[in-house]
Amino acid sequence: MTARQAPFVAAAATAALGAAMGLAARGIEPFATWLYHFAWFPTIVVMAALVARREGRDPLSAHPLHALSLFAWSAVFWFFFELLNWRLQNWYYVNVPADRMARWVGISLAFATVLPAIFLAARVLESWALLPRLKSAPMRVTPAALRLTTLAGIVFLVLPLVWPRLFFPLVWGATTLLAEPALYRREPRWSLLADLERGEPGRIVRLLVGGAGIGLLWELYNFFARSRWIYTVPGLDRLKVFEMPVLGFLGFPVFALECWSVFHLLACFGISTPEEPTHQPVRLGRKVATAVAGVAFSVFVLSGMERFTISSTTPQLLGVPGLPPSVAFQLEAAGQSPFELARAAAPALAREAGASLAEAERWIAAARLVTLRGIGTANARRLTRLGITDIAMLARQDPDSLAARLRAMPDAGRTPRPTAAEAWVWVRAARAALGGEG
């Protein structure tokens, strides 16, 4: 993309983004479920166009191998945090596609946007000079300081895994502390520590500010998508902006630093491909071997997410508790889903299905339970077997007791779902829907 093409590309991408948001808000598929993808890729194109307008060419099309490396290692990098979340249990996913292959591909594509978004946000700030040029007193970086930084990174990583409820925030910063000393020693031009040593904190500030902005967009797009993540952060799940607890937004700027340091440290070992030329020899065998290892690691984490992180898949009418298959097929043929059924008027549904008003009310109540905060059909059927058939009954439950009873059911197997925190999300949402406790 050239500077001349940039305005037209940006306009088209903005229009695509607006259309996706509008269609998703109306519940139109596939935009409602896949909004995160329909929103993020146009957003990346817009940011690339902004850079191209000022620099003459965008960094992704100018350096296609760098772009490919950025997207690919972005997914692998985020899978590392998904692995940590098995222990932290700070978030989970709802209403993901029911087909496993579509689900895994969709998750991987979503995670592939992380590094490009962070890097482009900082690049936009730089190319448009949106932040003043900053100077600071040079910081002395000694071998002892590098060793202490590495030790701090180990501590920041271990403490959340040992005591997750107390130290989970330290995860966001651990990889920066671990990567920076090695990056400083091998390639100071990419090191954030070296920036501070030179008294040039501008890159750090751009990453922090860009990370904060990207974090806000992540949460915005997630909030309006049906397929989404929900946070269960201990002690911070009351006051939220979109789905994110307010204090959680402090993690995005720190995370942006991690993205920069880890990607460029990989470049030092000839694994990732940086935008700037590197003195490291290109070893094709190493790149292939690490790519295979990255794919294997991603598949391993995706398999674990099925047990530890994914709570529900896209609900289908056939799975709504108590809804006869004949009625489900009839409604599905009319283009409806459990989301439309949850909003239906009982008299009209009764006439359409040739059922009694009481039956229609039960079906609508079941659909409302299915669609509440991503509970889903499988969880709703389990709730029904406990005698919880509607939102009012759910609102009266004790969340800890409810989670324990669900996990004790014969079909629960070894799955930890729902966690007590997840049950709290359900019960709190039920109470909010009835006008009670939110």
Image (cartoon, rainbow, N blue to C red):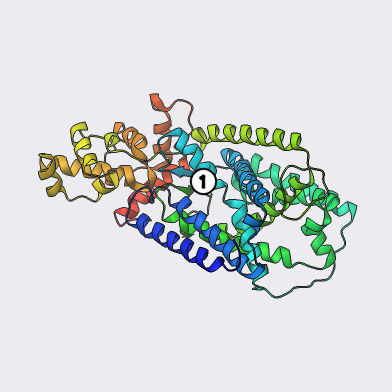
Res 94 quadrant in image? top left
Residue visible at 71% across and 49% down? Answer: 263
Q: How many labels does the image show?
A: 1
Q: Mark 1 points at which residue?
A: 91
Q: In this view, does 395 lie above or below 298?
A: below
Residue most extreme to the bottom: 132
Relative to 176, does residue 415 appear above or below in the rendering? above
Comparing 337 with 390, the one in front is: 337
Q: Which residue is drawn at 70% across and 42% down?
A: 158
Quarter of the rendering containing residue 55: bottom right
Q: Assign the N terminus to one quadrant of the image.
A: bottom right
Q: Name the residue type under label 1.
A: Trp
Identify which residue, 47 or 341, lies in the foreground. Answer: 47
The crowding category of the residue bearing disc 1, from other C-alpha atoms within 10 Å (few below 14, some 14 to 19, many at least 20), is some
In the drawing, does residue 423 fall left or right of residue 249?
left
- Tell me the SS state at disc 1: strand
* 162 on left or right of 102: right
The picture places residue 358, in percent across and down from the top left corner, at 13, 42
Residue 238 seen in render: no
Which residue of the protein is positioned furthest toward the right in this rendering?
143
Query: Hey, which quadrant is residue 396 in on the image?
Result: top left
Q: Where is residue 262 drawn, in percent x and y?
A: 71, 49
In the rendering, at what x and y percent does residue 336 appear? 25, 45
Q: Is the C terminus in the top left, top right, bottom left or bottom right quadrant?
A: bottom left
Of 297 and 50, the residue lying toward us: 50
Is 42 on the left or on the right of 134, as rendered?
Answer: left
Left or right, 356 with respect to 131, comes to left
The x and y percentages for residue 118 are 62, 57
Decide if residue 3 is in sight here. Answer: yes
